[in-house]
């Protein structure tokens, strides 16, 4: 079925689209252009919607806005926003009335005419997805990047050809209860995350299974041999298993042994490059490359893998070098929205950094983060809604009393950045890696990262401590 045929097939249905954000606006416009009856449900007010709301009204949409935006859902077809979980009571009630609940991403998978590689996990999925995109592009393929990164791809379906690739980052929000069948699925790792949204940790773990649950032996599933949940996933998979490991050899996939990255097929390993030749730093990026190498085995040559690893400078907001001022290096790792991701960033630093942490509370434990901050940080500036939890984790760490670590509680994010700059000396690193989402003060991690970079770029030599 083509995209146009799909739109025509639902033209006579009453449709609700929940959320008029980045992922759903193109979908809403597509449906309205196709003559569909669309109600847009958004928790923002008309004033907050601004020009987007005015445009949708002009195009013929109905708007259901404000705190009661989910009340009375009874449309025949409902597109949910990724942040609204399928077990929300309003969606469950609508299903009981006969509504079909889907999403822009689920429809994309049903219509996509080209090959797909999908990546999920708690940490590293954005970088791994981007590396796969870069590898395929360097190998000469036409590649479409989307999902939880890049742009919504549903409207681009008519531009895609069977020989193309769509490379997708998929979050647990998108995957929960979704039907999809990528040609290659990758799970980078699993650790507690988004427990403010999921029923419990097991629900979070199981949500990731949607990325491979519909696969058959003809598709590939790439798993992390060192992850505690990999065996559970492998036992529930029907697809062909491929592994990556930074410690042990693998029969099929990729591994790092004695500082050398290998690709393996049927037990025969081929060296690709040494870990220190990878341009972006950190042991976690070695794992990201191993996952990408395993995902693209048979599609991308070892030579292309080596070339991309040596030249790719990384992704914005991921250990991004912002500037050096007065001998102080400022690094933006705003993507560090979980304790494990921040711990990986800390270990990637060449010396103990002055780190800015804190943000929106996803109800994740920070005990391990307290140990990592005591072990790897020079000084900590704590801000955001999770400040008290992080402070308690630091003071509760068995390493705290002997670490000499100093922390400061600073409510204002900008002031935390300025304070870190004032405390830094020549040769120091100031690292933003919050270990939390950004929703307490920012729209998302990217907005937080841009604000950090803007603040840093406005600093002068007088702002740096010496």
Image (cartoon, rainbow, N blue to C red):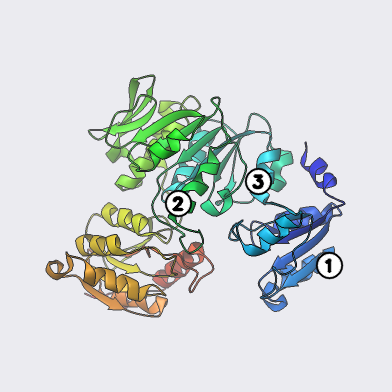
* Disc 2 + disc 1, Cβ < 8 Å: no
Residue beneath the point at 53% across and 36% down: 137
Work out whether residue 323 or residue 9 is closer to the camera in this orientation and state it: 9
* Residue under pointer 1: 58
Extreme front residue here?
96
Name the residue that disc number 3 marks: 106
**Secondary structure of residue under mark 1:** helix
Q: Where residue 233 appears, x then y in whole percent?
A: 44, 38
Foreground residue among 409 and 364: 364
Kindly report the distance in space between the C-alpha atoms of the residues bearing marks 2 and 1: 44 Å
| For marks 3 and 2 on the same chain, the one whose residue lies earlier in the sequence | 3
Q: Are marks 3 and 1 in contact (CB under 8 Å)?
A: no
Kindly report the distance in space between the C-alpha atoms of the residues bearing marks 3 and 1: 28 Å
Q: Nearer the viewer, mark 3 or mark 1?
A: 3
The answer, for residue 111, to whether it is visible in the render is yes
Q: Is residue 4 left or right of residue 135?
A: right
Q: Secondary structure at mark 2?
A: helix
- Dot 2 or dot 1, earlier in sequence: 1
x and y percentages locating residue 155 in the rendered image: 72, 47
Label 2 belongs to which residue?
Answer: 202
Residue ID at (29%, 62%): 369
User: Which residue is at 34% across, 23% downward?
Assistant: 270
Q: Nearer the viewer, residue 138 or 402?
A: 402
Secondary element at image label 3: helix
Tell me the quadrant of the picture where the C terminus can be found.
Answer: bottom left
């Amino acid at each position: 079925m083509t995209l146009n045929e799909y739109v025509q097939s639902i033209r006579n249905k009453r449709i609700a689209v929940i959320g008029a954000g980045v992922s759903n606006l193109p979908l809403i416009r597509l449906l309205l252009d196709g003559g569909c009856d669309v109600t847009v449900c958004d928790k923002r007010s008309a004033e907050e919607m601004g020009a987007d709301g005015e445009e949708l009204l002009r195009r013929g949409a109905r708007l259901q806005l404000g705190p009661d935006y989910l009340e009375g859902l009874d449309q025949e077809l409902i597109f949910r926003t990724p942040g609204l979980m399928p077990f929300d009571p309003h969606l469950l009630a609508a299903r009981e009335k006969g509504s079909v609940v889907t999403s822009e991403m689920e429809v994309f998978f049903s219509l996509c005419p080209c090959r797909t590689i999908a990546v999920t996990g708690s940490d590293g999925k954005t970088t791994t997805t981007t590396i796969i995109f870069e590898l395929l592009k360097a190998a000469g393929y036409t590649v479409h990047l989307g999902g939880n990164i890049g742009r919504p791809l549903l409207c681009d379906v008519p531009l895609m050809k069977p020989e193309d690739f769509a490379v997708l980052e998929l979050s647990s929000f998108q995957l929960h209860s979704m039907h999809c069948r990528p040609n290659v699925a990758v799970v980078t790792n699993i650790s507690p995350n988004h427990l403010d949204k999921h029923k419990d940790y097991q629900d979070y773990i199981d949500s990731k299974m949607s990325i491979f649950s519909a696969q058959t032996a003809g598709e590939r599933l790439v798993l992390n041999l060192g992850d505690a949940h990999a065996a559970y996933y492998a036992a529930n998979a029907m697809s062909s298993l491929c592994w990556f490991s930074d410690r042990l050899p693998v029969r099929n996939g990729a591994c790092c042994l004695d500082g050398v990255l290998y690709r393996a097929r049927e037990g025969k390993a081929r060296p690709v490059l040494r870990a220190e030749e990878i341009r972006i730093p950190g042991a976690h990026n070695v794992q990201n490359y191993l996952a990408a190498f395993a995902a693209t085995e048979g599609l991308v040559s070892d030579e292309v893998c080596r070339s991309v690893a040596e030249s790719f400078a990384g992704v914005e907001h991921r250990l991004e070098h912002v500037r050096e001022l007065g001998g102080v290096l400022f690094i933006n790792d705003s993507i560090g929205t979980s304790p494990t991701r921040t711990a990986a960033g800390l270990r990637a630093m060449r010396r103990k950094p002055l780190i800015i942490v804190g943000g929106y509370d996803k109800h994740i434990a920070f005990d391990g983060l307290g140990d990592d901050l005591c072990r790897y940080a020079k000084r900590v500036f704590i801000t955001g809604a999770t400040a008290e939890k992080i402070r308690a984790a630091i003071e509760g760490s068995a390493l705290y009393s002997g670490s000499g670590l100093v922390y400061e509680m600073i409510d204002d994010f900008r002031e935390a950045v300025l304070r870190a700059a004032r405390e830094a000396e020549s040769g120091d690193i100031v690292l933003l890696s919050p270990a939390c989402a950004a929703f307490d003060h920012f729209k998302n991690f990217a907005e937080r990262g841009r604000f950090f970079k803007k603040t840093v770029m406005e600093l002068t030599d007088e702002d740096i401590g010496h």
